[in-house]
Amino acid sequence: MEKTITVTDAARNFADIINRTYYSHATTTLLKSGEPVARIVPVAPAKCLARDLSRYLAEIPHLTKKEASDFERDLAISSGNLATTASKWD
């Protein structure tokens, strides 16, 4: 959604413009003497690059083989203890 307003109106309603930009992701074009002079746009979300992801994944602690085996055993035991329902919608 894009709105066009004068610079004077923008100055008078600056907080409202910022809120609309933040919450509604709206873009506002500012006019001076009828000509567009500026645009207030929402900031694009940060992008995750592969190198950042690989650094992040390298910092995650990993299970040892024994911990993984114990976890797998615990899951098997737990899933066997789950109650079944008469209908898949229950």
Image: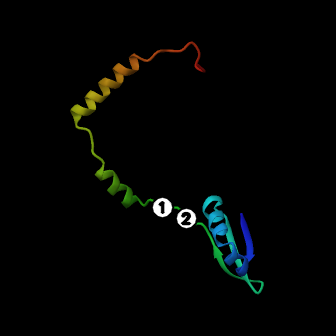
The Cα atoms of the two marked residues, 1 and 2, are separated by: 9 Å
Furthest residue toward top: 86
Using the image, tell me which numbered label, if any, was put on residue 47.
1
Q: Residue type at mark 2?
A: Ala
Q: Is residue 85 left or right of residue 55?
A: right
Rendered location of residue 15, percent (x, y): 63, 69
Q: In which quarter of the image is residue 86?
A: top right
**Image quadrant where one finds the N terminus:** bottom right
Furthest residue toward bottom: 33
**Image quadrant where one finds the C terminus:** top right
Using the image, tell me which numbered label, if any, was put on residue 44.
2
Secondary structure under the numbered disc 2 in the rendered image: loop
Decide: few, some or many residues near mark 1? Use Cα within 10 Å; few <14, some 14-19, many ≥20.
few
Q: Quadrant of residue 82?
A: top left
Residue 73 vs residue 13, the one in the foreground? 13
Q: Is residue 71 left or right of residue 31?
A: left
Please determine whether, in this image, residue 45 is positioned above or below residue 32. above
Rendered location of residue 12, percent (x, y): 69, 76
Rendered location of residue 14, percent (x, y): 65, 72
Q: Residue type at mark 1?
A: Lys
Q: Are marks 1 and 2 in contact (CB under 8 Å)?
A: yes
Q: Quadrant of residue 68?
A: top left
At x 63%, y 62%, the residue is 25
Residue 79 vs residue 19, the one in the foreground? 19
Residue 23 vs residue 47, the one in the foreground? 23
Residue 25 vs residue 15, the one in the foreground? 15
Q: Which of marks 1 and 2 is in front?
A: 2
Rendered location of residue 52, percent (x, y): 37, 60
Secondary structure under the numbered disc 1 in the rendered image: loop
